[in-house]
Image (cartoon, rainbow, N blue to C red):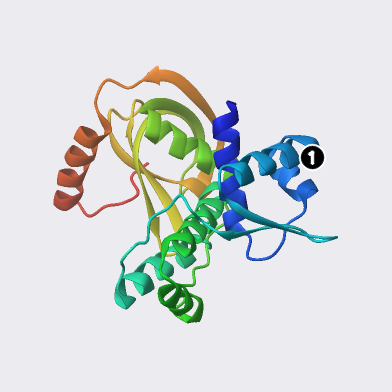
Amino acid sequence: MSRSIRLLNLLQRLREYRHPVTAQTLAEHLQISVRSVYRDIETLRAQGVRIEAAAGLGFQLKEDFLLPPMTLDETEIEAIFLALYWLKSVPDQSLQLASNAVLAKLDAVLPKHRQHFMEQTTLRAFNVWLPVDMQILEQIRMAIRQQVKISVKYIDEQKNESIRTLWPFAMGYFNDKIVIAAWCELRQAFRNFRVDRVRQLVLSQDVYPQFKQQLFRQWWEQEKRDSTTDRN
């Protein structure tokens, strides 16, 4: 990791804390030494970043000089907050951490009166999800992003087990379940797979032969023609 990236990561971590945070905590999050944290904080200070040190408590970012003010009205703030709060319930640790990071960035760029409004927002989204393997969920998102094939052990509705090679191109969050939309090489057709029924997953390096946007459009046309959602 380059030093410039490390400094940006440190700055982002400081944004996420409303109260002082210790150098030890920052070092653990960033996977660097405590000594490096102190050295990087001094570098940021030399560049004009206001980072205050509280004896026995740690460091706190007092203002963010890098990000410009952002203009959002109250309804837009409520919409973003509600979406990010809902995301905290999704059983995917990376997305949960990302939602916290986005909220911290918003807090850094919003004018003071909008920051106060966001802090006072009481809109909430609640969801109860079927248990899933978070590592498998993250691997599926990675496969969709990179447009590569995956091999899964899947348990269908009748408790039958099969090994499938899939081209995952979309994922949907429906009520209590998370569903993968994919081309199934076994069936030679589009199929929907519930993530809670995936028992094992191997992430391939093989790029599938169509762009995910093309597959999504073809699948969506089929879904509009056929309302059956579980034909595995």
Q: Position of residue 30 (x, y in %)?
A: 67, 40
Residue 133, visible in the rendered structure = no
Is 96 situated left or right of 84 in this image? right
Q: Position of residue 182 (x, y in %)?
A: 33, 36
Compared to 10, does 122 lie above or below? below
Residue at x 68%, y 44% (from the top left corner): 41
Q: Nearer the viewer, residue 4 or 173?
A: 4
Residue at x 16%, y 52% (from the top left corner): 224
The quarter holding residue 147 reads top left
The quarter of the picture where the C terminus appears is top left
Residue at x 51%, y 43% (from the top left corner): 137
The quarter holding residue 70 reads bottom left
Circle 1 packing at 10 Å, graded few (<14), some (14-19), many (20+), is some
Is 105 situated left or right of 6 in this image? left
Compared to 162, does 193 lie above or below? below
The quarter of the picture where the N terminus appears is top right
The residue carrying mark 1 is: 34
Q: Position of residue 173 (x, y in %)?
A: 40, 56
Q: Position of residue 217 (x, y in %)?
A: 18, 40
Residue 102, visible in the rendered structure = yes
Q: Residue furthest top?
A: 206
